[in-house]
Image (tube, rainbow, N blue to C red):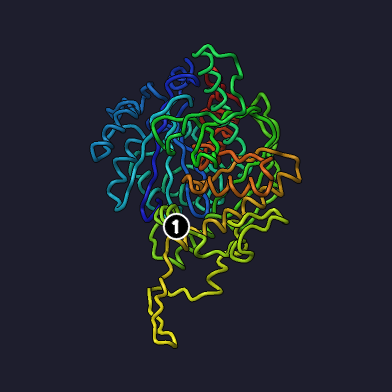
């Protein structure tokens, strides 16, 4: 999906449940929210992908909006514009980015209208190698203001790029990147969306008159729409029996869990019990170097796919059993004595080492004069085999970590997870290794944990660093902190 000069955009508008409260307007009137066009930005700059969260004051026109003759960010208007073949929404921060980016070949925008997050949260994603282009676009939009006290404006950031690209942001945009610890940012962002999910379940129960906690811990009967669709829950699991994604209500939100962040590589983080203030304890307990960049790098070497999304779409229809050696290929079926089903992978790419796999179909002449047609290796099968190899490895390491720490809930996150195929493979592998005792859970915004967490952590710094405080899910308004 992400190729040269591609941006993936989802605009999320919160109109109920987790509202901004009445202090938003007063905070802006007092000058404590100093940001061009009234938006607050946070970045998670990884080795392969950059994730950006923009928080806009939904329904509140700022002084900058008025001075530019624009309007507050209106997601509905942007969605309508996108549906008509172009995006020329309002003169808000995100709207201007959307209007600027179509000049880039291959640009794609996906917008989502949803509720429950408070204000308007917009999510953007692009390949880090196009950072120069993105910074130039920001520089063209609007001169970035200085802090009211004369200091630099600080923008929350996390990931290695928060340090690598800091000089570029300061030179071209005139603000500094305020780095947050990557593990803490991931955990804080995950807890934010987890709390939002719990709040939404509670709100729906209250609206329906159902007793509190009804159905907790069970997968809902309704299928979750594809990611970035207009509606749908935040948290879900994969039902292997029904081969579908289903809504899931966490029976113990805030309880200790493992967060497996799949980016270029993989980090496995033990996230402690959530505290009332929103703080969480984190401990990186494991990880591995085989991650999303491994999959994409091998795809580029072995296939002709030009973008990551093309490769993943191909994996959806590929058959890894044509490439991998299965238990049934060795034993002729399952190996019941060891509890190994016949369709379990015994050796990734094992068949490639035992057969001829030409890159193009060819005909071999036999000694008796007959011909044998050898089919070509299908790129979709190669891609599916690569995907299964990477995800099975991640699931095994995650299970070992969960067993070591006595945890039965694993949240998988990271921008690598984009399609049901990936969730199906992870869920199946984790079920096999744990005997069905450990649950694999996913969130719609798993790729933005770091950026959202960096924004929340920066809110603790208060207005003295030019950062806007943010409400936690379920709060009544803005809480500005000075510590």
Mark 1 element type? loop
Q: Residues within 10 Å of mark 1 (few under 14, many from 20)?
A: some
- Image point (50%, 51%), residue name: 165
Measured as percent of width and height from the top left, residue 185 is found at 59, 39
Q: Nearer the viewer, residue 453 or 346?
A: 346
Farthest left residue in view: 84
Measured as percent of width and height from the top left, residue 325 is found at 57, 65
Residue 152 shows in the view: no
Query: In the image, 359: left or right of 256?
Result: left
Looking at the image, is 201 positioned above or below residue 235? above
Q: Nearer the viewer, residue 211 or 103?
A: 211
Looking at the image, is 98 positioned above or below residue 28? below
Measured as percent of width and height from the top left, residue 294 is found at 54, 60
- Image point (42%, 74%), residue name: 374
Quarter of the image with the C terminus in it: top right
- Image point (42%, 21%), residue name: 15
Q: Nearer the viewer, residue 30 or 445?
A: 445
Farthest top residue in view: 209
Residue 313 shows in the view: yes
Q: Residue 276's quadrant in the figure?
A: top right
Looking at the image, is 479 positioned above or below residue 52? above
- Image point (41%, 82%), residue name: 364
Q: Residue 459's quadrant in the figure?
A: top right
Query: In the image, 478: left or right of 255?
Result: left
Measured as percent of width and height from the top left, residue 23 is found at 49, 17
Q: Nearer the viewer, residue 264 or 230?
A: 230
Farthest front residue in view: 368
> On the image, numbered disc 1 is attached to which residue?
318
Q: How many marks?
A: 1
């Amino acid at each position: 999906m992400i190729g040269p000069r591609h941006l993936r955009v989802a605009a999320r508008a919160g109109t109920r449940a987790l509202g901004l409260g009445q202090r938003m307007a007063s905070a802006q009137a007092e000058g404590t929210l100093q940001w061009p066009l009234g938006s607050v930005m946070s970045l998670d700059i990884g080795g392969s992908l950059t994730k950006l969260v923009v928080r806009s004051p939904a329904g509140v026109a700022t002084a900058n909006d008025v001075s530019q003759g624009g309007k507050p960010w209106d997601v509905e208007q942007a969605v309508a514009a996108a549906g008509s073949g172009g995006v020329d929404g309002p003169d808000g921060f995100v709207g201007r980015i959307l209007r600027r980016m179509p000049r880039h070949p291959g640009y794609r925008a996906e917008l989502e209208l949803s509720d429950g997050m408070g204000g308007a949260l917009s999510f953007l994603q692009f390949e880090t190698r196009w950072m120069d282009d993105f910074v130039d676009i920001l520089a063209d939009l609007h001169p970035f203001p200085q802090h009211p006290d004369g200091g630099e404006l600080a923008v929350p950031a996390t990931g290695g790029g928060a340090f690598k690209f800091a000089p570029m942001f300061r030179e071209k945009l005139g603000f500094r990147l305020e780095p947050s610890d990557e593990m803490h940012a991931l955990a804080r962002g995950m807890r934010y969306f987890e709390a939002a999910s719990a709040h939404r379940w509670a709100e729906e129960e209250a609206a329906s008159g159902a007793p509190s906690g009804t159905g907790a811990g069970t997968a809902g009967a309704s299928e979750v729409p594809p990611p970035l669709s207009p509606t749908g829950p935040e948290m879900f699991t994969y039902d292997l029996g029904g081969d579908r994604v289903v809504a899931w209500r966490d029976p113990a939100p805030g309880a200790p869990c493992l967060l497996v962040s799949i980016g270029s590589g993989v980090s496995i983080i033990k996230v402690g019990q959530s505290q009332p203030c929103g703080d969480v304890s984190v401990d990186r307990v494991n990880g591995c170097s085989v991650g999303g960049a491994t999959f994409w790098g091998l795809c580029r070497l072995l296939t002709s796919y030009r973008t990551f999304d093309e490769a993943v779409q191909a994996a959806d229809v590929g058959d890894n059993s044509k490439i991998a050696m299965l238990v049934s290929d060795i034993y002729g079926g399952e190996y019941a004595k060891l509890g190994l089903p016949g369709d379990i992978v015994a050796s990734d790419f094992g068949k490639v080492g035992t057969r001829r796999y030409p890159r193009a179909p060819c005909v071999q002449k036999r000694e008796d004069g007959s011909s044998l047609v050898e089919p070509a290796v299908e790129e979709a099968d190669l891609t599916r085999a690569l995907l299964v190899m990477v995800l099975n490895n991640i699931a095994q390491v995650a299970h070992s970590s969960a067993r070591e720490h006595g945890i039965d809930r694993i949240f998988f996150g990271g921008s690598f997870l984009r399609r049901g195929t990936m969730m199906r493979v992870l869920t199946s592998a984790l079920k096999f290794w744990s005997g069905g005792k450990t649950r694999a859970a996913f969130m719609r915004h798993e790729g933005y944990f770091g950026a959202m967490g960096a924004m929340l952590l920066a809110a603790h710094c208060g207005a003295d660093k030019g950062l806007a405080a943010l409400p936690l899910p379920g709060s009544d308004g803005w809480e500005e902190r000075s510590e």
